[in-house]
Amino acid sequence: MTDVTGVAGVAGVTFEELDAVRWELLEPATEFHPPRETKRALRRLVRKGDAATEEDCHPLFDCFGPGRGRVPSVATAALPFVVRLALARHVGRGARAALVELLVGAQKEAAGADPARVDAGWHAAWRLQRPRFPALLADPAPEVRREALPLAGDTDVLLERWRAETDPAVRLPLLLALGDAAAASGGAGAVDRVRDAVTGALREGDPVTRVAAVHAWAAFDPDAPVREQDLLVDALSDLAVRPRFETVWYMPSVEQALDREAVVSWTASRLGHAPEVALSFCARLVGAARAHGDPLLCRTALDEAWRLLVVRPFVAAGLLPLAGALLADPDDGVRYRAAHLLAVLGPEAAPYADGLAALVDDPGEEEYLEGTVGDHARWALNRIGDPRGLPELVERLYAPYRDRYSRAYVLGEPRLPEIEEVLIPLREHAETLLPAVRELLRDPGADGPLAHCFLEVLQAWGPAAAPALPEVVPLLEDSRLSLSAIDALVAMGPAAAPAAPAVRGAVVLDHPANHLTVTWALGRLGGDHDEALRLVGEAVLREDAGYGPVHLLGTFGPAAAPYADGVRHVMEHGGPWLRPRAAVALWRITGDPEPSASVLEADLFPVAEGGDAYGSFLDALHALAEIGTLSPAARAALHAVRRSDRRLAAYRDHRAFLQDERIRSAIDAVLARSEGPRDASRTVR
């Protein structure tokens, strides 16, 4: 019989003990890992002993079912065996470290799960094992000691280990664990004792340990990194120190040590509550990186500055000159980031237009990011309004899609914008850009999603897109594109009237809403206006139709007066998506601001109170700009939103800047359009 014998009085695990458990009666983590698999995984570890590896523990992780918000009874039964194997010196050290990681994860799962989803015996079983954990903290294998840090339980146990520990690759994560434990303790005495240890490390440690000490301090004193910014910048920008991070900055449950760049990012996140200091930190790192010829640090600092800029508009003033200077940097990745940063800032980047224009053909790339330096420089010029970004623009936007169904971009930032995001704002340059757009619409490889993009652009360009009529009409024969083509044709206005016969024969999926859209479009293109009004109006009155075409009814204006009561009914009883659309339609029909304005204003206040329902907020703004009136309460809410120092967007990539600009522009339009306060007694619902 194989037996794994522990040391220091810790018993091993035998096959007989494992066989004595009625595994088949236990609750599994998932149906794919029945309890017998837990027994099999434990037997494998016993059998292999010193030859056991981390990989041998992987089936056991599956049996515990981490990440599912529950602790099954099979985990409770396995717990004492896992602890004893983790302590058994005759089990491979890699396997023992993995078993400790499993223990930490299981307890974290139990602490965060709904109590009803935690096996009734788990907490008692865990308490029985706690006296064994200090032995793990003193294990001869540093990787085991490191993984066991979350099992310490309190600051005094960690402080005892801090005084005894000599391995730098354990002392550093131990220092970080001390900070977290002090923050969790809530006791002044524990915090004071940890502060003494941290300040000692700040005075006596090497540069990497001093950075870790600041992180540990920040766990219970968020302003520590603010006070120690000089120390952080000096240590993180010292090229001689850089390799040291990768040898000692370990974290529990993370296989590899963090490199210097990862620590820079983590440090920047510690400054999130002090954005001015965070900006200074990033700028100083960029300056040091340029002075030392350290492109990796420069890229990382720019990435952190970008993340700050996404949520804090005021950061732009400090980053503009920095990004402008970096356009001439010798490193492709630095120029790439600088060009993108200037692009998202749009007109604010105008002083650097010449530097951007010099880069439109720059082929420099950054691994794992999309596009070239030239692509981002070209977009920056377009955002600025500089015509030097127009030549070959459409072709460059299409290039990533050529010979493929879609572009295979990464989700990280920075990345290229979508075609419509670039072209829609360039309506005044439609005459210049339309020939290339028309050519691509004739390209049989540009069907599907890409054609939808171009049709969306043409719709936004409106009458300026009319020369593309010959390319849009054939798309009416494709049910995937026909409705988008109809929208583009209607937006073109009277110039699209010759397309009416083709619209009448458009191939659409057989659904009443699609046929109504065709009828409505014919009325807009010079067909039977009265018939279109009647059919759309009757559909709105039929409650079983879902009120879908209510937004179309508003386009008929006062002629739709016979259906006004039906529109009002939709506005009062429809869902969140329909009510504002019905409100706009009712105003267009009656010309009376009320009750439409009150309904629309209701979508303003959640954002003014800190919410993030920006889509409905923007829709309401556009409609209120048409109506032209605001209540005093709504006016005050919009002024409050306009003054707020936050990015008005739910996105955290380049779209955040585009949405923020649209919203702020719409707020300005509403405030300018409204003719002063209305009667303050008007009810705002």
Image (cartoon, rainbow, N blue to C red):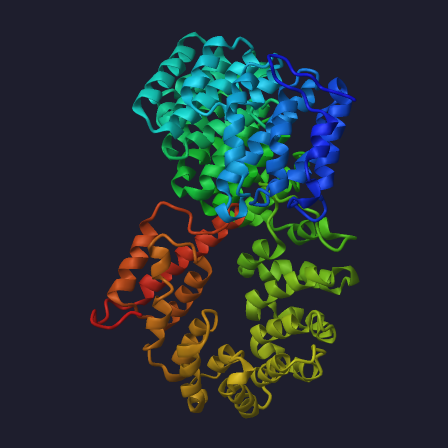
Given residues 451 and 408, the one toward you in this image is: 408
Q: Quadrant of the C terminus?
A: bottom left
Is residue 498 visible in this depiction of the protein?
A: yes
Q: Is residue 57 left or right of residue 349?
A: right
In the depicted structure, whether residue 41 falls above or below residue 215: below
When asked about the image quadrant of residue 4, the answer is top right
Q: Residue at 55% of width from left, 12% of height from top?
A: 168
Looking at the picture, tell me which residue is in the foreground, 325 or 654: 654
Residue 388, position as x, y percentages in the image:
58, 46
Q: Is residue 674 above or below residue 107?
A: below
- Counting every numbered tag in the picture gives 0
Picture residue at 57% right of the left edge, 16% below the top: 248
Percent x, y of residue 578: 47, 73
Q: Nearer the viewer, residue 581 or 365?
A: 581
- Left or right of 136? Residue 410 is right
Residue 293 in view here: no
Q: Quadrant of residue 372?
A: top right
Q: Residue at x 57, y 34 (%)?
A: 105
Could you say where residue 609 lies in the image, as x and y percent from the top left? 33, 54
Up/down of 6 relative to 588, above or below: above
488 left or right of 41 in image? left
Q: Nearer the viewer, residue 469 or 279?
A: 279
Quarter of the figure that contains the N terminus? top right
- Judge whether 7 appears above or below 330 on screen: above
